[in-house]
Image: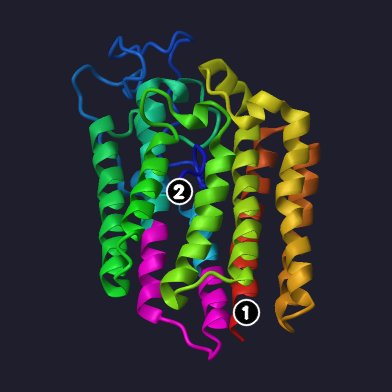
Amino acid sequence: MPLGRDYDGVVAASSRPSRPKQQRLNPAGIGKASGKPGSGKAANGKAGAAPRAAAGDWISGARLRTLPLAIAPVALGTGAAVVANGNGHWEPVLAVLCLVVALCLQIGVNYANDYSDGIRGTDDHRIGPARLTGSGAAQAKQVLAVSLAFFGLAALAGLAVVIITQQWWLLAVGAAAIAAAWFYTGGKHPYGYYGLGEAFVFVFFGLVATCGTTWVQAGAVNTESWLSGVAIGLIACAVLMVNNLRDVEPDTAAGKRTLAVLVGKTAGRVLFCVFLLVPFLIAGFFALIYPLAPLTFFMLLLALPAALITLTAKTAKELILALKLTSLVALGYGLALGAAFAF
């Protein structure tokens, strides 16, 4: 499940780690310490010295502020399952397992992006929060191992869901989700480098996560699940878009052709507002049916400032603030509308 470089995922609004600023390599991407592109060594590091990241660096590398994009679709899918079951029933164990899958995939993709962008040399031009691999805070193989460990935990939780539900075809869905998470920035031709990040985020952080959660608890996918999956998928796209708007210049220099790079800053800002605000039209539809659904509109108190900041931002710091607000919008939207379905 891809989500941007820091947020990418879904995207990163986390604070900068406690160690020094991201080390900058020369324009050719050659590490001064190692003489190799994308080596992940700090430029001023001692030759042969193994980097030692502190606990705070690893926590920052997990990009905890991206986790609302994992929590929200599970909340929406569970609320929709209550509706689909028709008797107020839901499956707490399955809901928790779905949440574990989503969280582990999100953290796994954050570390995977750290690793892949670091060894590729993309982070040599980075202006956002420092990363473990690109800054030389940790060895690339360590970051890769942590990423694979979280993917493994997601796979185990997903396998438990399959065993409980006996829906063996879900194994293919889980495999596709892990593959999508890895190949966002990994492999020889990562799709995140060709402007396809938002499309995959919409599918996996929106439709798959929401409708999958509903299916395993209700054995069906209803209108509530489909439409709320569309809504949260669009908000996830907004998070990725504002993250990539922040990084247009360094991504261009590194040859990373995100959607923001392809369409340009002006069109990217407009797309961000569309991604962020259309979900409230969907919430308006549900407000005609569910008495608590209007609570979702309180998230406009965060969404509208995020849109205004993004439209007028002149610095990366402003866009990071918009990203933080958008991530909170995702969490509040998912919890509020999910609760409206359930109650």
* Residue 81 among magenta residues: yes
Q: Which residue is mark 1?
A: 341
Mark 1 secondary-structure assignment: helix
Relative to 313, 168 lies left or right: left
**From mark 1 to mark 2, how far is it between C-alphas?**
29 Å
Q: Which residue is mark 2?
A: 63
Mark yes or no: residue 12 visible: no
* x and y, in percent, of residue 309 in the image: 77, 44
Mark 2 secondary-structure assignment: loop
Magenta span: chief secondary structure: helix
Relative to 249, 111 lies left or right: left
Of the two numbered discs 1 and 2 on the same chain, state the one appearing first in sequence: 2
Nearest to viewer (mark 1 / mark 2)? 1
Magenta residues span 75-103
* Residue 223 among magenta residues: no
Q: Tell me where residue 131 sits by quadrant.
A: top left
Residue positioned 76% across, 47% down in the render? 274
